[in-house]
Image: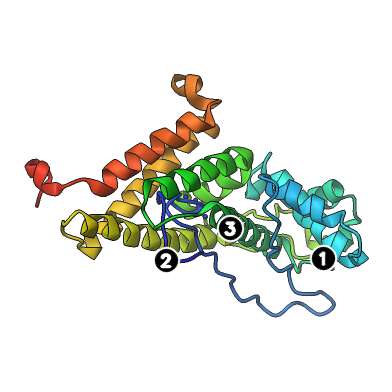
């Protein structure tokens, strides 16, 4: 909705990246650069199950399943630790040492699963985007743009945003700031010289790329849903106007949720704990915006 969330041709409210309840975002997996000698490539995005709203909790639960190899359990523990830490700090503040301590593994073990901190952040961002997509796909029912479908995906997106507010902050702020990209701590020697760089010190490159990919796909699908609604009403289904509307409505959704769950605006305290009320409000506004007739507002026409 990455203001911040891949799927079928349907859509529900479009939020920016991470998620716009309009459809499900498609996160793209970027190719990894060759790993340095002695290091394995970064962990691939992990498709966590959707029986939990928390991405970190889903990773942890999977890591406890029987039959996993020790290396896979360690990889999941590292990804879960990264997700938990990003709930408490920015990518710029994250360090490999902090990840190792949180995961309960040796510092060098992290490098056996990720070539550097940036690769770890990218894997976390992509895995989280897949998690959002899969969650929204699981509740999607009915035709694209139909109120019942919009409400269902909006309801789930609100819950995901609230439960994973730290990761959502990483996605939305990376998209907003256009933070400069740089490498994370490349080796233990480099860390001891520089006092250990943050894993995302120049940060958020992976989160920013994921945010934009989610936005493009999500809002493109939302635009198709808007066109479908307008055609059914016998109105113009201009694709450019539909796409611009999708982006505007997606930004509205993410900004409202950021005010609720990231900035905790006191003016919204009365509704902050009522996810159902939030979902119904956003669904009502999204449908009204999607159906808005420009002829009814001559001052807004070109």
Q: Mark 3 or 1 closer to N-term?
A: 1
* Relative image position of residue 234 (x, y in whole percent): 16, 57
Please indicate whether residue 6 sits to the left or right of residue 227 in the image.
right
Give the spatial CA distance, label 3 vs label 1.
23 Å
Q: Residue at x 80, y 64 (%)?
A: 187
**Which x, y percent locates residue 123?**
67, 63
* Residue indicated by mark 3: 129
Q: Nearer the viewer, residue 17 or 198?
A: 17
Tell me the crowding category of disc 3: few under 14, some 14 to 19, or many 20 or more residues within 10 angstroms, Cα based. many
Ranked by sequence position, the earlier of labels 3 and 2 is 2
Q: Is residue 192 visible?
A: no
Instruction: Name the residue nearer the viewer: 227 or 186.
Output: 227
Whether residue 97 is visible here, answered yes or no, is yes
Point out the frontmost of discs 3 and 2: 2
Asked whether, in this view, residue 124 is left or right of residue 226, the answer is right
Secondary structure type for disc 2 = loop
Looking at the picture, how far across and down is residue 277, in whole percent? 46, 29
Q: CA distance from mark 1 to mark 2?
A: 39 Å
Q: Residue at x 57, y 40 (%)?
A: 159
């Amino acid at each position: 909705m990455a203001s911040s969330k891949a799927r079928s041709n349907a859509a529900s409210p479009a939020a920016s990246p991470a998620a716009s309840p309009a459809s499900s975002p498609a996160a793209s997996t970027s190719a990894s650069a060759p790993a340095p000698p002695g290091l394995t490539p970064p962990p691939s995005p992990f498709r966590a199950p959707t029986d939990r709203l928390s991405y970190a909790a889903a990773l942890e639960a999977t890591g406890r399943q029987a039959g996993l190899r020790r290396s896979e359990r360690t990889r999941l523990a590292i990804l879960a630790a990264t997700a938990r830490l990003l709930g408490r700090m920015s990518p710029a503040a994250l360090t490999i040492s902090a990840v190792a301590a949180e995961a309960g593994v040796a510092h060098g073990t992290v490098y056996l699963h990720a070539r550097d901190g940036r690769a770890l952040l990218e894997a976390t961002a992509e895995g989280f985007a897949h998690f959002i997509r899969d969650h929204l796909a699981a509740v999607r029912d009915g035709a694209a743009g139909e109120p019942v479908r919009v409400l269902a995906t909006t309801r789930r997106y609100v819950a995901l945003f609230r439960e994973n507010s730290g990761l959502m902050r990483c996605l939305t702020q990376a998209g907003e700031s256009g933070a400069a990209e740089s490498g994370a701590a490349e080796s233990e020697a480099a860390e001891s010289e520089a006092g250990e760089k943050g894993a995302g010190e120049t940060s958020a490159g992976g989160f920013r790329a994921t945010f934009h990919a989610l936005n493009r796909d999500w809002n493109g699908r939302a635009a198709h849903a808007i066109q479908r609604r307008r055609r059914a009403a016998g109105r113009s289904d201009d694709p450019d106007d539909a796409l611009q509307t999708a982006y505007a409505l997606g930004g509205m959704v993410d900004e409202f949720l950021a005010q609720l769950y990231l900035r905790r605006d006191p003016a919204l305290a009365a509704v902050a704990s009522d996810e159902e009320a939030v979902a119904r409000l956003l669904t009502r506004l999204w449908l009204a915006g999607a159906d808005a007739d420009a002829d009814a507002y001559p001052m807004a026409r070109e």
